Image: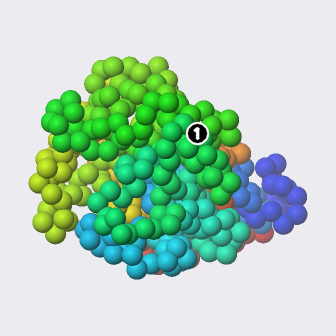
Amino acid sequence: MAHVPHPFASPARTRLTVIRANIFTATGDKPFYGAVLLAGDRIAAVGAADEIGHPDGARLIDAPGRTLIPGLIDAHVHLAYSGAATKAAFRNEHAELSYPAIALRAAGYARATLDHGITAVRDMHAPGGVVIDLRDAIEAGQVDGPRIKACGRGLTVTGGHMDQPGWGDQTHFEGLTQPCDGPDGFRHGVRQEVKRGADFIKLNTCGPAYGGPGAWCRLEMAADEIEAACDEAHRWGLHVASHTTGEVPLAETIRRGVDCVEHAHFTDDAVIALMAERGTVLVPTLLVNERNFELDPAAQGVPPRHWRWLEASRDAKWETLERAKEAGIRIACGTDAGFQVAHGSMFWRELAYLVKGGLTPAEAVTAATATNADLLGIEAGRLVVGRLADLVLVDGDPFADISILGDPGRLTVFKGGRQIRSGGGGHDICLDHMHG
Ligand SMILES: [Zn+2]
């Protein structure tokens, strides 16, 4: 090949990489054999292999039979939590670990997450807001991990969901969560998280109730509190995500301005119509509910009435997903990793559940890349020119067997154009030819 400057090459010292593989752009196109040119931390070109060629000085990764997809994104994680399977273990961790210790442990989970091809996450609450500090440490290059959008601490009413009802009243944890009361209290809560550096606001608008069909969920935040929190967050340019389940809580939460609903089990036609009208995003978190049924109920410490709730929501979540897909609602992909779900290694199972729930494998991967990137507000998630070069080169065809995405040994991961790990049974060196 002639050593002429490539039209896409930027001058002097920009790191260039060409990857030839089956390319899934997450823009609605079918995978095609072609090439992607990375220049620095961005995607500089996508097209036919002979069109992209091999620019002078570029590293060439020639990977026929492999699939190049955008870096995966988990829209719902808790890096501060270990994935402990029992309520007692979860509580012990809070009692035993200082917030700095939680943050240091979270750095390990962040690395494990990245190693599984997950190049960005949305962190949905951390004690002490410590994941904001982890985000900054990753951005500063002090530790390796995915890009993080963090809410700091989730907002809840006193005694509500995540204000840890059921602890002995002698137990007081400073800053474990962010209880607020009244519209002014929620405005203050939003501003406190903004001050801390939050990227978005997490509300916990409801908790489980045990009244049976139609009354499985109780709205805990008052309507004016939800409205004040959303108004304040939007004034700061932040989106609002809400832990909400149940027909009445969902309708009220969405109507009052929440942008994205987490879990959202138990819907009816009115809720779905409202979501469609408002453009609300759904994060169905299918795996975390299923995890309850893989673990022993007695060991988990789940009381019988809550077990009945879990069984009801197990059915309800599939119905929500089906209705949402039918109505064309944007479906994002989040695992709730940290709650009975391991960081990184279980992510592929959420994709598999989305497929079980009626999405095609391509739709599931698009949810976890393009849709999640839009939700996080990051310039990744699609293999198009100008986007961040967050990529996963998969050894095989994940659209034929999505479980491949669970095997880090088959994933070569790039974040911002930098190769984080190689997955190819130790043969990666054979893929890599320096040139020029
Ligand atoms: Zn969660």
Please name the residue that numbered disc 1 is placed on: 184
Determine whether, in the image, residue 31 is placed left or right of residue 250: right
Determine whether, in the image, residue 73 is placed left or right of residue 16: left
Is residue 51 shown to the viewer in this render?
A: no
Colour scheme of this structure image? rainbow
Q: Position of residue 133 (x, y in %)?
A: 62, 67
Secondary element at tag 1:
helix
Q: Amino acid at mark 1?
A: Asp
Residue for point 61% across, 52% down: 193
| Of residues 86 and 146, the one drawn nearer to the viewer in this rendering | 86
| Of residues 293 and 244, the one drawn nearer to the viewer in this rendering | 244
Determine whether, in the image, residue 95 is placed left or right of residue 193: left
* Image height of 55 relative to 216, above or below: below
Quadrant holding the C terminus: bottom right
Quadrant holding the N terminus: bottom right
Residue for point 49% across, 44% down: 181
